[in-house]
Amino acid sequence: MAAQPSTIIEAKDVDFYYPGGEDADSPALSGINLTVNQGEYVALVGPNGSGKTTFLKLLNALLIPTHGQVLVKGISTAVESTLPEVRRVCGMIFQNPDNQLVATTVEEDIAFGLENLALPPEEIRNRVFKTAALLGLEKLLSQPPHLLSGGEKQRVAIAGVLVMEPECILMDEPTAMLDPAGRRDVLNTVRELNRNRNIAVIHVTHFPEEAAGTDRVVILNEGKLAADGASAEVMTDLQFLHGLGLQGTTAVELAALLRQDSFPLPPQILYNRELVDSLCSLGQNS
Amino acid sequence: MTRSITLGQYIPGQSFIHRLNPRLKILILVLILVLLFLLETFGALLASLAAALAMFALAGIPFSYLMRGLRPIFYIALFALIIYFFFTSGGVVLLRIGFITVESEGVEQGLFIVARLVVLVLFSLLVTLTTTPLSLTHGMGYFLKPLRYAGLPTEEVAMIMAVALRFIPTLMEESQRLMRAQLARGADFETGSIFRKAGNMVPLIVPLFVSAFRRADELALAMEARGYRIGARRTRMHEDIITLKDWGALALVLVLVALVWAFSL
Ligand SMILES: Nc1ncnc2c1ncn2[C@@H]1O[C@H](COP(=O)(O)OP(=O)(O)O)[C@@H](O)[C@H]1O
Ligand SMILES: [Mg+2]
């Protein structure tokens, strides 16, 4: 139980088997050890069925490890009596913006978690209005969710988590069902919260660009940790990514193709900007 | 598109009627319905129609919502009119077609019944349009509370109702999308016998059910992730406070009922 003060999440030798899953000797997750510190922004990537969603659910006590332990701020997720605290510290945003909004108006949806904590109405209202103002949702407070755009729905979901004053936000492909504008909106919102409020983020994504924009990338494959490192390292190792059936960012992929054509590009290109700059300086030199 | 679903579709606003306490609003509606059944004269009925329209204006509800809300009762009204016109006798004969006669008594009664129905629907509509569905379910939940002592989980039932209300527009939207998709593939929901029509609905109903269950699954997870626990004590963001204004409105309606009753208006 002696977790570091700055550690938010600690997974220790976690195995997870779905009860009644296909067969007992294929765990959804096995031997996972992972620590996430306060204020870190971690991208979680991996092929379909690699266990990303399962892992997030373990961090929020929606699932309990079959073996091993998950500690959230030092509290084991397996203890029933501390569940509300675990879920307050670790909020979860799901992929489908429609299926996580519970209430008939935006403000009541943001309030849902606080109502579950049985806080006094006065305090609930104050916190809801403050959070809505922070995310620019004031104008939408009395709207029913089905009239919002996908991006707005996800921001309402984020507000519903943020109002609980979490220390970690878990996001399961939060932008997969959004249009480009909605995606940008949601990513900027989360990034700001991460920077300004020091909230840790674990972000499951299929978009290489989103993963490349984080501090740290963790890769799952067939229920095991396949990589864990700085995004500049993990996301530029194309051979490794392709081996798992994953893609690099456009810049990484393109740079690799150009290198095959023997253009001498530096190895650490990750973003489009870097690629363009290198190409420009190449052009000038030749 | 989904705005066209009027029942349970709240129109945001800040009017006096919007802000009336939902519990009392329901009680007042019941009283008004009683009042409408006590009314005996066209004059009183017209006055209540005027009152209903004035309240719609006060609540800032567009006229189109009103018409849309009345549409479902159109055929009922027509049916009632026909029955009364042709089968109620008394008064002077206004029209004679063969052995069928239309007599003044029937016309009067028919019009009275239909006018009453219209006013009744208008007042009910006013409540559903100015109260969030959630407040409405909580308001009704309040009157169901005594059932808790009979072992009914009223809090949970209220939550179920609230969630159902939340998802009605979403599922409507989805069914319309599915219908369009099927229409684009040449499906036909309009012609044929009733059995054929029902058969044609299968490709619509099945995916809708599948999706609804998937949604339910995800929603349950999301609710759990946000700390909802069955049986745990909850509070609500908007307290159910009854103010002096609310009592005033109730008193006013009570006085009206008493007047109508006393003077058989
Ligand atoms: N509810 C469940 N019951 C049984 N097996 C499941 C369930 N959910 C997921 N799985 C299995 O667990 C594995 C990991 O799934 P998941 O965590 O959803 O992967 P990802 O999110 O990376 O696509 C998959 O093999 C999947 O078939
Ligand atoms: Mg998944």
Image (tube, rainbow, N blue to C red):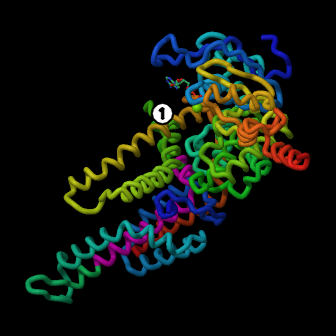
User: For residue A13, which quarter of the picture?
Assistant: top right
**Residue drawn at 41 percent across, 55 percent down:** B181
Please state the extent of the stretch shown in magenta in the rendering: B109-138
Within the displayed image, which quadrant is ligand 2 positioned in?
top right
Is B171 left or right of B198, judged from the image as shown?
right
Secondary structure type for disc 1: loop
In the depicted structure, whether residue A249 falls above or below residue A23: below
Residue annotated with mark 1: B153
Residue drawn at the location 68% of the way across and 13% of the way down: A69
Give the chain of mark 1.
B
Q: Quadrant of the N terminus of chain A?
A: top right
Residue A48 forms part of the magenta stretch: no
Q: In the image shown, does A124 or A218 lie closer to the viewer?
A: A218
Where residue B197 sits, quadrant-wise, is bottom left
Q: Is mark 1 within 8 Å of ligand 1?
A: no
Provide residue A231's location: percent of width, then percent of height.
78, 31
The one of A129 and B112 positioned closer to us in this rendering: A129
Q: Position of residue B191 (x, y in %)?
A: 24, 62
